[in-house]
Amino acid sequence: MMKFVVLALFVAGAYGCGLPTFPPVVSRVVGGEDVRPHSWPWQISLQYNRQGEWRHTCGGTLISNQWVLTAAHCISNGKEYRVAMGKHNLVETEEAAVFMGTANIIVHEKWNPLFIRNDIALIKLESPVTFSDAIMAACLPTAGFILPHNEPCYVTGWGRLYTGGPIADILQQALLPVVDHATCSKPDWWGFQVKETMVCAGGDGVMSGCNGDSGGPLNCQNADGAWEVHGIVSFGSGIKCNLAKKPTVFTRVSAYSDWISSKMVAY
C-alpha cells in the first residue's frame, strides 16, 4: 500500500500545474516565434465542426484534467465543439494529441458582446484527460491578484501571423509586457473601454495577439517558477493586430476566481 501512495504522489508531482516537462524557451525577447514543442502543455485548440471537418476557432487553457478556460466570444450557439490537447502543429497528425468532445459549456451569465464585458467561459470535457508530458494544466492565480506594470508575460496561440495573414500551423509565443490599468485606460490608449476586470499587455506596435488567438492564455511565471494563466485573450484593435498604444486586452482571470470555482463545483 505504501508503495502505491508514494507512486501516486510522484505522478501528481510530475504533472503539477504550470510546470512543463519541456520548459518554454523564454531567455530572449521573442518576436512571435514557433514555440518549443509541448512547452505550453495547457494550451488547447478549440475546434468546431464545419460539414464534417474540424476547424480551429480559438485558443483556451486547460486548468484541470476536465476543465478548459476560454473566452465567451469564442462560443456560438448551435455549433459542435471539440478540444484538441497536446497539439504543436495543427495540420500534422501527432502522437501526443488527444481530441475530446464537451460535456458542458458555461458562458458567463453577464457576458456582454456589445461592450465586451465578462468575456469568459468554461468548457467541461466529456471525460477527464490523462496528463502527459504534452498535456497538463496551468496554475490559476491568487484571487484578486494584480500583475505589476511591465511584468513579462507570454501570449500563446495559433492566431494569424499578421493582420489579414494566415493562421499559424505551429503554436506561436510572443512576449507581451503587462501595461497597468492607469496607463491602459488613458484616453490615447484604450480609455473607458478597459475595465478593472481586464488586463492589458503589449502595445509597443510590434508584438500582439491576433485573430485566432482569442480565448488563449496570458502566461505569467510566479515566484516559485510555475506558470499561471492570468488572462484570456479578449480583444485588440480592429484596425490591425499590432497597433501602438492598443495592447491586447485580456479578461483578468484573478477577477473571476469565485465564478470559476463555483461553476467547477456546480457542474
Image: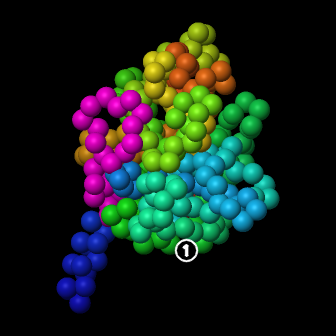
Q: Residue furthest top?
A: 188
Q: Is residue 16 magenta?
A: yes
How many discs mark residues in the rendered view? 1
Magenta span: chief secondary structure: loop
Q: Where does the magenta region start and end?
A: 15-36
Q: In the image, what residue occupies the spot 29% across and 72% down?
A: 11
Q: Is residue 254 visible?
A: no
Residue toward you, 258 or 94: 94
Percent of width and height locating residue 149: 39, 23
Q: In the image, what residue occupies the spot 63% across and 31% down?
A: 164
Percent of width and height locating residue 266: 62, 65
Percent of width and height locating residue 184: 53, 19
Residue annotated with mark 1: 127
| 64 to 187, vertically: above or below | below
Quarter of the picture holding the N terminus: bottom left
The amino acid type found where label 1 is placed reads: Ser
Q: Residue furthest right?
A: 78
Colouring:
rainbow
Is label 1 in a helix, a strand or a loop? loop
Task: Please give left or right for residue 109 compared with residue 203 in the image.
Answer: right
Percent of width and height locating residue 211: 61, 37
Residue toward you, 93 or 124: 93
Task: Please give left or right for residue 22 compared with residue 116 in the image.
Answer: left
| 263 to 111, vertically: above or below | below
Q: In the image, what residue occupies the spot 29% across and 38% down?
A: 26
Quarter of the picture holding the C terminus: bottom right
Residue toward you, 51 or 76: 51
